[in-house]
């Protein structure tokens, strides 16, 4: 009896060791087979029950389309701002003693600076002309005996952010030829704060709606695991690993994310297509043209990718917790 | 093959279902487990399949100490054990073929291999021509045999059955028991929990009898035989 017990102990131990190596060998093939099977099965599932899952991915689509639309809005506003930005400028008022040639030369030097997009010299007469044309004060100015305006160099900075303009203005204002300096940054400031508000709104909305996607997927997965409770128990009884049980649900999450993301892109493109007619009319009435920018292909792919990652992750978290709690207990 | 060493199981409610059981089932042996309702038969099978864990004592199956087995090892351990349940635990929305194929799918068998093995298992329980049926379309006895086919499809070293004849008439019960005996003849270690003392007595296997969670000697076999 003691002998058989020893044998029983030794032999199976060997057997298990052999099994262990075979298991790792088999593992990748097994894994692939299961994935192929699931891919077929999950697609078949969706084709068989197209409406059962529609509500879930429609909610996901709407939840993703809202931040996408906000993002596109911000992008178009930035484009609009870009069209105005040509006017953002630093005015350098030159010392009176500086000759016109020296002034023009200084302007040419400034153009060569990398942070300067353009710079040009305005003589005192030019400045007067421009000023009176702008203010519509022709007759009044003509009545002045001498021109009170200094010669000016107008500098258009490359960067349109406030700090960059300030740094450049400070730098140029300290040049010996420059008597005084003035920056046109009020509207830059205003635009920046609008952009900032939109940015924050985008973050907040994305966060809230991302959470919505997580909750919707979580709830769908909770129902799905509950509906397949018996199956989970039986599969565990015949030796399914946690990841085997989880995998079909991750496929479900993948399809929900994919469909949700694709439909969200469709909704965004559709909304912009609806808007582009009226926007054209509006722009035309202001004498300009504005081409509405929609989601680009990489952005759309990013949105779909984010949807897929978000829903797979949320499926993973929910399902892992659920299937760990579903333990077989047959009678 | 299966060794219990002073194994006890106390359920959450405080009920002591098994009290310090020590026993051994040899490799290739076939034994019956019997006892009154509530004696602890199902509990013992659940401990061996690691559906439940013992409160104290050791269990060693196929050389593996179950007490030290981690959760992630349990699935691989179960693949080497076939289980048959009284309520057969079939998936009602899957065909007979798919139900029987489940252990192979879980273990990642090749499709061709799977077909061959499922057919062989169904053939053995006499249900080859029912592979496309759904379980509801089968009689109780046929469903039980599908459960048996699923339990043996990956040729486990150990076959456990809990009341496999509970719902069957005497003729079918006899057939099912003979089926288990057949698997035992080709080397499978078999352990069957059953109430059916009359049937057990007519078969030449060791009987373990439980009473209130205690193992009483397997004299029941001789007792009924002689009486
Ligand atoms: N999950 C559980 N929680 C608490 N008590 C349990 C649990 N499972 C079983 N028991 C109790 O443990 C005892 C033994 O149960 P077990 O199912 O092992 O009996 P059995 O011998 O299989 O009976 P039967 O022949 O009726 O199936 C019973 O008194 C039962 O009430
Ligand atoms: Mg029982």
Image (cartoon, coloured by chain):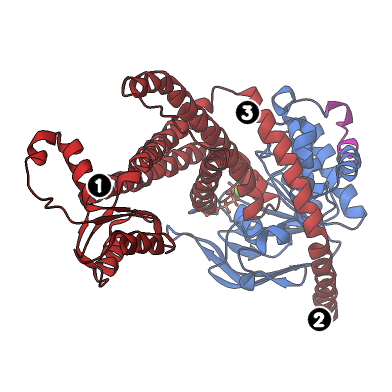
Chain colours: A red, B blue
| Residue A176 in the image, given as x and y percentages of width and height | 25, 73
Q: Assess whether mark 1 and mark 2 are in contact (beta carbons under 8 angstroms).
A: no
Q: Where is residue A16, by image quadrant?
A: bottom right
Pair 1/3: label in front: 1
The residues colored magenta run B120-130
Residue tagged 1? A126
Residue tagged 2? A2
B77 drawn magenta:
no
The residue closer to the viewer here, A202 or B222, is: A202
Label 3 secondary element: helix
How many labels, in total? Answer: 3
Q: Is residue B47 left or right of residue B60?
A: left
Label 2 secondary element: helix
Q: Mark on residue A46? A: 3
Q: Residue at x 56, y 51 (%)?
A: A327
The answer to whether residue B31 shows anywhere in this view is no
Q: Residue at x 42, y 31 (%)?
A: A62
Q: Is residue B210 left or right of residue B221?
A: left
- Looking at the picture, do discs 1 and 3 lie on one chain? yes
Chain designation of label 1: A
Q: Residue at x 34, y 61 (%)?
A: A101
Chain designation of label 2: A
| Residue B4 in the image, given as x and y percentages of width and height | 68, 70
Classify mark 2 as within 8 Å of ligand 1 or not, answering yes or no: no
Q: Where is residue B53, by image quadrant?
A: bottom right
| Residue A47 in the image, given as x and y percentages of width and height | 65, 24
The answer to whether A82 is drawn above or below residue A242 in the figure is above
What is the C-alpha distance between the residues marked 1 and 3?
73 Å
Q: Is residue B87 left or right of residue B138?
A: left
């Amino acid at each position: 009896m003691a002998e058989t017990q020893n044998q029983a102990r030794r032999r199976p131990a060997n057997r298990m060791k052999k099994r262990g190596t075979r298991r790792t060998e088999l593992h990748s093939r097994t894994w692939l087979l299961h994935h192929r099977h699931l891919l077929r099965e999950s697609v078949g599932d969706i084709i068989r029950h197209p409406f059962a899952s529609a509500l879930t991915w429609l909610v996901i689509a709407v939840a993703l389309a809202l931040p996408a639309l906000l993002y596109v809005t911000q992008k178009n506003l930035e484009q609009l701002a870009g069209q105005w930005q040509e006017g953002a400028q630093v005015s350098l008022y030159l010392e009176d003693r500086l000759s016109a040639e020296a002034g023009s030369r200084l302007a040419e030097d400034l153009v060569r600076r990398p942070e300067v997009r353009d710079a040009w010299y305005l003589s005192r007469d030019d400045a007067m002309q421009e000023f009176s044309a702008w203010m519509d004060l022709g007759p009044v100015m003509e009545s002045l005996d001498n021109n009170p305006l200094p010669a000016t160099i107008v500098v258009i900075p490359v960067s349109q952010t406030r700090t960059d303009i300030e740094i450049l203005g400070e730098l140029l204002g300290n040049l010996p030829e420059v008597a005084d300096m003035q920056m046109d940054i009020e509207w830059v400031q205003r635009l920046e704060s609008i952009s900032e508000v939109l940015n924050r709104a985008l973050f907040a909305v994305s966060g809230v709606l991302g959470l919505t996607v997580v909750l919707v997927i979580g709830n769908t997965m909770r129902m799905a695991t509950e509906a397949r409770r018996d199956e989970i128990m039986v599969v565990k009884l015949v030796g399914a690993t946690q990841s085997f049980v989880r995998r079909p649900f991750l496929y479900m999450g993948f399809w929900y994310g994919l469909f949700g993301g694709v439909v969200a892109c469709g909704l965004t493109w559709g909304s912009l297509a609806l808007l582009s007619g009226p926007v054209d009319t509006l722009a035309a009435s202001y004498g300009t043209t504005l081409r509405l920018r929609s989601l680009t292909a990489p952005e759309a792919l990013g949105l779909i990718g984010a949807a897929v990652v978000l829903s797979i992750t949320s499926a993973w978290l929910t399902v892992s917790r659920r299937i760990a709690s579903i333990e077989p207990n047959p009678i | 093959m299966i060794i219990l060493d002073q194994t006890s199981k106390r359920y959450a409610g405080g009920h002591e279902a098994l009290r310090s059981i020590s026993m051994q089932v040899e490799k290739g042996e076939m034994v019956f487990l019997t006892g009154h309702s509530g004696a602890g038969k199902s509990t013992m099978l659940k401990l061996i399949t690691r559906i439940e864990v013992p409160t104290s004592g050791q269990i060693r199956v196929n050389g593996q100490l179950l007490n030290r087995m981690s959760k992630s090892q349990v699935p691989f351990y179960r693949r080497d054990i076939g289980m048959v349940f009284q309520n057969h635990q079939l998936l009602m929305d899957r065909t007979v073929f798919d139900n029987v194929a489940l252990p192979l799918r879980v273990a990642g068998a090749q499709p061709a291999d799977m077909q061959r093995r499922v057919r062989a298992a169904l053939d053995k329980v006499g249900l080859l021509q029912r592979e496309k049926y759904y379980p509801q379309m089968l009689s109780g006895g046929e469903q039980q045999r599908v459960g048996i086919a699923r339990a043996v499809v990956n040729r486990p070293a150990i076959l456990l059955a809990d009341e496999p004849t509970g719902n069957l008439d005497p003729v079918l019960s006899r057939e099912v028991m003979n089926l288990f005996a057949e698997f035992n003849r080709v080397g499978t270690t078999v352990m069957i929990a059953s109430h059916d003392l009359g049937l057990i007595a007519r078969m030449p296997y060791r009987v373990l009898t439980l009473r209130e969670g205690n193992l009483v000697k397997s004299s029941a076999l001789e007792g009924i035989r002689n009486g």
